[in-house]
Amino acid sequence: MSAALALVLLVVGSYLAAHVAFDWIGKRLLIVSGAEYIILGILLGPQVAGLLSADLVESFAPITALALGWMGAILGSRFLLSRMIRVPAAFYRIAFVETGITLFLVCGVELLLLRW
C-alpha cells in the first residue's frame, strides 16, 4: 500500500471516529460542531502523534488556503444586503465587541504562552 493511500485512509478513519465521538459529546455538552477538525489536526500533526511530518503539513498550505477561500466565497455569497440592512445596528455592534474581546483574549493568552 502506498504512503499516500495509507495517509488518506488514516485521515478518513480518524475523522469518522472523531465525528462520531464529537457528535455524542456535542449533544450532551453543547459543543459546536467542527471542533473535531481542530482536535484531529492536533492529534495527527507533528507535535503529538508525529504521523504527519512538519514538511508534509507545510506542503498542504496551498490546498488549505484554497479551501478556506472557497468557504469564504460561499459564505459571503449568502449575505443579502437587503436582509442585512433590516438588522438593527446594535446587533452588529455586539458582534464586533464579542469578536474584539475574543481576539484580545486569545492574543493575550498566546503572548503569555510564547513568553513563558
Image: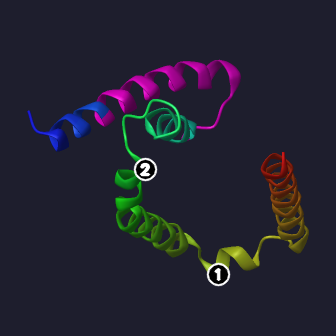
The residue tagged with tag 2: helix, strand or loop?
Answer: helix
First to last magenta residue range? 11-34
From the viewer's perspective, is residue 17 above or below residue 11? above
Mark 2 or mark 1, whichever is nearer to me:
2
Q: Is residue 104 magenta?
A: no
Q: Earlier in the sequence, mark 2 or mark 1?
A: 2
From the viewer's perspective, is residue 65 above or below residue 7? below
In percent of the image, x 52 and y 70: which residue is there? 78
**Quadrant into which the C terminus falls:** top right
Q: Position of residue 15 (x, y in %)?
A: 38, 32
Outermost left residue: 1
Q: Position of residue 52 (x, y in %)?
A: 37, 41
Q: Is residue 33 magenta?
A: yes
Write down the residue under mark 1: 81
The mark found on residue 54 in the picture is 2
Query: Which amino acid does the dot numbered 2 rest on?
Result: Ala
In percent of the image, x 65 and y 18: which residue is there? 28
Label 2 – label 1 distance at C-alpha: 42 Å
In percent of the image, x 84 and y 52: which residue is there? 115
